Amino acid sequence: MTTVVALDVGGTGIKAAVVRDRTPEHEITVPTPVAEGPDAVVSAIRQTVANLIADAGHVDAVGVIAPGPVDAHNGVLISAVNMGWHNVPMRQILQQQFGLPAAVEHDVRAAGLAERVLGRTRGIDDAFTITIGTGIAGLIIARGEPIIGAKALGGEIGHAPVHPEGELCPCGSRGCLERYASASAIARRYQALTGRAATAAECVARLHTDPAARRVWDDATTALGLALATYTTLLDPALIVLGGGLANAGTVLRDPVRAELARRVTWRDVPPVELSPLGSRAGLLGAALVAEAGI
Ligand SMILES: [Zn+2]
């Protein structure tokens, strides 16, 4: 039996679990103390790992995933817009404190890996898993291999432009996919339109009763369809999987994205678009797989 401690460090919470033979136990979420600065976040990661090791008794390895860019080869968290950290040698920190093998990976790549080992893209050589949460990015699988590109920045489709003169993005560009279709963008755009606060999930619940929620949602699914049309023409995937928190919306997300993709790519059959069966656990499972691979 392999027992690992897995952490999925996000902008608002750290999801963590002891994972025995790829089954999460002792699942917890603790707040990410972003406002207290990067050192506090690193301390929270160390404390969470310590608590779970104490719960588990015996642990073989630790896996931590976080927003990118991440240098998985050297185990370094390079930077992340929300976290404020720069070049944190997380693998070394964990190995020194706990005396265990430790692995670090980009959260979206880890989620895509989980999809490939345990989810919908298993056995498929050309696929794209797009993770839609606070931000948007994806894992490209081509000819059976993950493609991360020349600078390990491949898959950052969240910053693909979908509106030439669109909303300004924190990345410095305009009209990025992420400004329209991430869960945070949906909440922000709904509030801008109505003056009322609502989460993306609350917008989904109001689609049939609230025209503003419908408008924001339609903008999001159209933007996703546009970006995936470009992906399809370039890489010809056999399957596109929608994952991350927004995929909990289910068919109200999947069906209009499928329709927009088909509307934009008329000269060929478009690949099927499916929902991830792993839900918001994909990251945690990916962190466990990364830990396992590092043993
Ligand atoms: Zn951008």
Image (cartoon, rainbow, N blue to C red):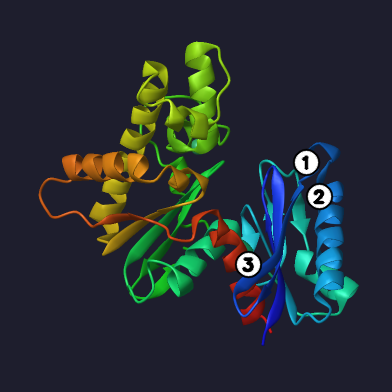
Q: Is mark 2 within 8 Å of ligand 1?
A: no
**What residue is rendered at 75% in x and 57% in y?**
87
Q: Can residue 279 be seen in this view?
A: yes
Q: How far apart are marks 3 and 1 (CA)?
A: 21 Å
Mark 3 or mark 1, which has the lower sequence index? 1
Mark 3 or mark 2, which has the lower sequence index? 2
Specify the label residue 88 is tagged with.
Answer: none
Residue 59: x %, y % from top left: 78, 79
Q: Does dot 2 land on a helix, a strand or a loop?
A: helix
Pair 3/2: label in front: 3
Quarter occupied by the N terminus: bottom right
Q: Report which residue position mark 2 lands on.
A: 41
Q: Report which residue position mark 1 lands on.
A: 34
Q: Report which residue position mark 3 lands on.
A: 287
Q: Does dot 1 land on a helix, a strand or a loop?
A: helix
**What residue is rendered at 46% in x and 28% in y?**
203
Q: How far apart are marks 3 and 2 (CA)?
A: 18 Å
In this rendering, the answer to whether 29 lies above or below 143 is above
Q: Does dot 3 land on a helix, a strand or a loop?
A: helix
Residue type beneath disc 3: Ala
**What residue is rendered at 32% in x and 73% in y?**
125
